Amino acid sequence: MEINLNTKGDNRQVLLCNTNRGAKYFLESIKHRNNGEYKKIPNFLIKKNGEVINLHNKDVTSFFLPGFKIEKGVVVVSLENDGWLMRRSSDGKYVNWLGDIYDSKVTEKKWRGKLFWDQYTDKQIKETSKTLNKICKKYNIPRVTTGHNVFMEDVVYFKGIVSRSNYNEYWTDINPTFNFELI
């Protein structure tokens, strides 16, 4: 995969976030939302099977971090992941925030008021690491991470790899099943 973005200004971060649904449905939703004028589109999508999709080469960072005065300099990489899950009392099945039944392995860990989480796959983590290497090298972004997914004061000034949950104590991506040591 070739990494080529039309970026302006000083690139300083790679922002990791989730799709919060399966890749197929995520791609359909961004295609049709707001009559095709939806702007919150990541630069890259990494599916659970490890496939990397370059969604666009424009800089749309400000839409991913509402309330923060960041308009450029961040490359957004979204990982296919349902995020937090709920267990239905009626049948004990796990569902995502849309009510879709989740049928893969669930991790139980209390974090940010949620208890059940979708997991990232080994293939996905491996491809995420490769993609981060390419992005960081091409755009001279330091290949360092925050090493965690919790709120970080002044993360806007951090140069390297961050997650949306570093920006706000309410966002839940990247979720606690992500192993930062593997990237």
Image (tube, helix red, strand yellow):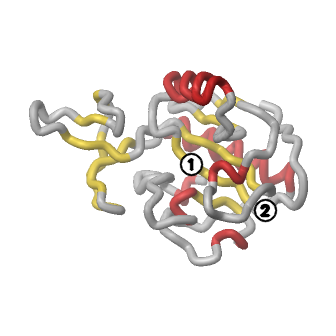
Type of the residue with mark 1: Cys
104 in relation to 6, above or below: above
Q: Find disc 2 in the rendering and name its residue.
A: 12
Q: Residues within 10 Å of mark 1 (few under 14, many from 20)?
A: many
**Callout 2–callout 1 Cβ contact below 8 Å:** no
Q: CA distance from mark 2 to mark 1?
A: 16 Å
How far across and down, in percent of the image, does residue 142 sit? 77, 63
Viewer-closest of 155 and 160: 155
Is residue 165 toward the left or the right of residue 1 in the image? left
The image quadrant where one finds the N terminus is top right
Tell me which residue sits at (34%, 61%) in the image: 111
Type of the residue with mark 2: Arg
The secondary structure type at the circle numbered 1 is: strand
Is residue 124 toward the left or the right of residue 5 in the image? left
- Tell me, yes or no, if residue 11 can be seen here: yes
Tell me which residue sits at (41%, 52%) in the image: 177
Viewer-closest of 16 and 52: 16
121 in relation to 154, above or below: above
